[in-house]
Amino acid sequence: MNSMERRITNEELMKFLDQELAPDDRARIERELATSTELQRDLARYRHLRADLRSLGADIEAPDMWSSLHRKLTRPVGWLLLVAGALLWTGWGSWLYFTSDEDLIMKFAMGGITIGFVLLLAGTLHERWIEWQSDPYRDIER
Amino acid sequence: MTTFEPLERRDSNAVKEARQGHVVSAQITQGAELTNEVERELILKCRGGDARFFEPLVRAYEASGMRVAMGMMRDQDAAHDAVQESFVKAWKNLGRFDMKRTFGPWFFQILRNQCRDMLRSRQARAKHVTKDERLEERPAAVDTGPGRDMERTDAKRILWEGLEQVGDEHREILVLKELEDFRYNEIANILEIPEGTVASRLFHARRALREALEDLGYAGVGS
């Protein structure tokens, strides 16, 4: 006997099982249930399955993740302060140096070294980032 | 004269405890239920940037988050990473959180998307991991002793295998309903589907699992 013949749709059976039906509909299904052994058997199977699945959930350990999470949440603030401080410090230092009475050639040399260093660092970091993103083994622990 | 004092008096205990800095493990226990009102208060405080107020939310949802992620990811370490990353994303996006909603379904929506992303990237990268290896990553059953307990453990292994066979779409709805007992409207919210389709999807998922378990010769976990 299929669900059409038994006058209860599969969706209604699910809603009955999950207690999502309005009282009138629930009463109607209960009346159908009282007369259909097939329906009773189906319902019992689903209830057993639910109980078994719940027992899986009981085995799953829930780790305490707050301390590591707290570090993750507050770390960006630390980085932000560090980077902002470093930029301010470097900017101020550069301003003092380039507006000082130092020889112009020395200023060009120092500027070249600084810009070259920043470009090399940025290029290396960019390459590492691209490499990391496409690394197929990045999640594999040694 | 600021409005700090009256607001202070209206704070719930969880919020007060968070402010005092001793919320923490002693006051807010894992899995403790927070009312919607308390959650909203905590979220408002979190938006001010104080991470201490996020702790009661983490404690309230980490256990259920872990069960959902474990059900979807089938791997303890990956599930842990998914839950943690979802909390980080939730924290970063609290400013965009609609205060008319409840935190739980919103968080589980983030978690579900996180699990999906991680599964996709894992499937693309780690095709060499065999089914047997994945089964070994299941959490060990809490049962002890030989005989009947061993049968129970085997039954659970088969149950996991059945869940694995039904596919991601069926598995996620089964996990949300059967492991966490979410209401249909919450499931619809988390999976971003119309509420009217939840019952139908649940039916297909349950039938698929039943058939998969029958094929695997599943006899039930038993009592």
Image (spheres, coloured by chain):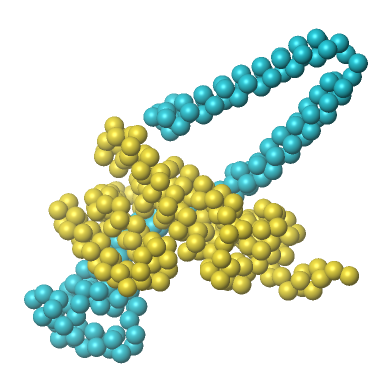
Is B135 positioned to the left or the right of A80 in the image? left
Is A23 positioned to the left or the right of B27 in the image? left
Estimate the x, y position of residue A3 in percent, counting from the top left.
Answer: 14, 76
- Residue at left 80%, top 14%? A107
**Which chain gets the yellow colouring?**
B
Foreground of the two, A10 or B101: B101
- Residue at left 32%, top 68%? B198
Foreground of the two, A9 or A99: A99
Is B62 positioned to the left or the right of B161 in the image? right
Residue B136 versus residue B205 in the image, above or below: above
- Residue at left 71%, top 70%? B11
Quarter containing the C terminus of chain B: bottom left
Q: Quadrant of residue B15?
A: bottom right
- Residue at left 42%, top 54%? B112
Estimate the x, y position of residue B205 in percent, counting from the top left.
Answer: 25, 61
Estimate the x, y position of residue B115 in percent, counting from the top left.
Answer: 41, 49
Chain A display color? cyan
Foreground of the two, B50 or A62: B50
Foreground of the two, B80 or B145: B80
Is residue B63 visible in the rendered image? The answer is no
